[in-house]
Image (cartoon, helix red, strand yellow):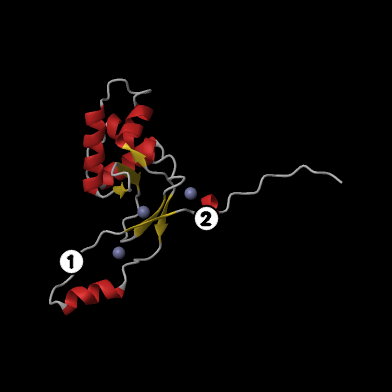
Amino acid sequence: MDKEQGRTILKRLKLKVTPKRLEVMSCLGGEPLYLSADEVWQRIKVRVASIGLPTVYRILDELAEAGVITRIFLADRKQYYFLCTNQEHHHHFVCESCRRVEDLGQCVLGEGAVEAVQRSGGRVTSHILQVNGVCGACSNPPREASCRTK
Ligand SMILES: [Zn+2]
Ligand SMILES: [Zn+2]
Ligand SMILES: [Zn+2]
């Protein structure tokens, strides 16, 4: 994601366009991978020496509130962030091996969950769902090219 795209998104979210917000967005928007706040900070501070880790946390929180950053939860209990501009209701598949994140095209909440809540007289108002696993590329690494000749 370049600065121009970042600017367009911030305007759409009615957030003030600041150089630091743009840096955070272009850092996370480079590849479809999740990063921790510390990792974002390590990458940005090379270019913007005046940025501190608390500022990075604040910006990540603001962008998460605005809906353009998704928090990723993993077994290590650290918090990770993923930039996703898809505003449709959807969920993510997270590769725990290479950190790649894929949008799942449709809602994967089973009917059973909604029915179970309704059976006990309640109603579902929202849900949070993240699918963890190992992606295809990590499951089937390309075999090492053999250079055997006859
Ligand atoms: Zn993977
Ligand atoms: Zn997404
Ligand atoms: Zn859903």
- Residue behind mark 1: 125
- Relative side of 11 to 31, left or right: left
Q: Say which of 95 and 103 sits in front.
A: 95
- Is the residue marked 2 within 8 Å of ligand 1, measured from its CB? yes
Label 2 environment density (alpha carbons within 10 Å; few <14, some 14–19, many ≥20) = few
Furthest residue to the top? Answer: 49
Q: Say which of 67 and 56 sits in front.
A: 56
The local secondary structure at tag 1 comes to loop
- Residue behind mark 2: 136
The local secondary structure at tag 2 comes to helix
Residue 88 in the image: above or below residue 12: below
Percent of width and height locating residue 59? 24, 36
Q: Say which of 117 and 64 sits in front.
A: 117
Q: What residue type is labelled 1?
A: Thr
Q: What residue type is labelled 2?
A: Gly
Instruction: Tell me how many marks there are.
Output: 2
